[in-house]
Amino acid sequence: MAQIRIRNTNEIIAGEEKVREFLNQYEVIYEHWDTNKLPQELADNFSLSDDQKSAILNIFQSEIQELASRRGYRTWDVITLSEATPNIEELLAKFEQIHTHTEDEIRVIVAGAGTFIIKGTPDTGYFDVNLEPGDLISVPENTPHFFTLTDERKVIAVRLFVEENGWIAHPYEDHSFQKS
Ligand SMILES: [Fe+2]
């Protein structure tokens, strides 16, 4: 289950209900999928072929359809990142810049792990949301954030989009950002 760390105070928020309550005040959606149905050969594979990515979308078809009809997503895909990703350093450097989008950014971690760093109220500042398999998060439109991997550097995630270009990153300069 997801865990939150508030950067300014190092406070940790854990437990599904507390995490959801904290995130909901920022209109960040937090839900959970059952990833136990993902076969081991897909869950342990961080350089998936296109066929394997389609297989993952099929496995979660009902969850995806339900989410799409509830929230208006029109396209979805599977992304995997690991040390095997050829331009991983370049990609991570790009991901780790604070930015916003004109639509929400929704990700479901189906294997591995990842962290969203999100800007809260001025009092709270930035907080990290550490995500595990099954965790679904949606960062609202125009909310400054970025994504990074954990030290393991392995993730498989499902992404859903309303518009093809809605998730273009608009850089957000923030001198209040605390690096760690
Ligand atoms: Fe983003």
Image (spheres, rainbow, N blue to C red):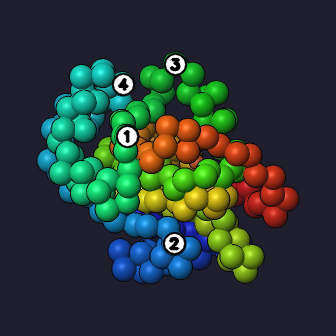
| Residue at horizontal 76 percent and vertical 52 percent from the top | 172
Above or below, 118 relative to 99? below
Give the SS element for disc 4: loop
Which mark is in front, 1 or 3? 1
Estimate the spatial distance between the alpha carbons at disc 3 and disc 4, rounded to whole Å: 10 Å
Q: Mark 4–mark 1 contact, CB under 8 Å?
A: no
Tell me the number on the disc at residue 30.
Answer: none
Dot 2 or dot 3, earlier in sequence: 2
Tell me the number on the disc at residue 86.
Answer: 3
> Mark 4 = which residue?
47
Q: Amino acid at mark 4?
A: Ser
User: What is the crowding at mark 2: few (fewer than 14 residues within 10 Å), some, or many (at least 20)?
Assistant: some
Estimate the spatial distance between the alpha carbons at disc 2 and disc 1, rounded to whole Å: 22 Å
Q: Mark 4–mark 2 contact, CB under 8 Å?
A: no
Tell me the number on the disc at residue 27.
Answer: 2
Q: Is mark 3 within 8 Å of ligand 1?
A: no
User: What is the crowding at mark 3: few (fewer than 14 residues within 10 Å), some, or many (at least 20)?
Assistant: few
Dot 4 or dot 2, earlier in sequence: 2
The residue lying toward the viewer, choosing from 24 and 101, is 101
Quarter where residue 15 is shown: bottom left
Dot 4 or dot 1, earlier in sequence: 4
Estimate the spatial distance between the alpha carbons at disc 1 and disc 3, rounded to whole Å: 25 Å
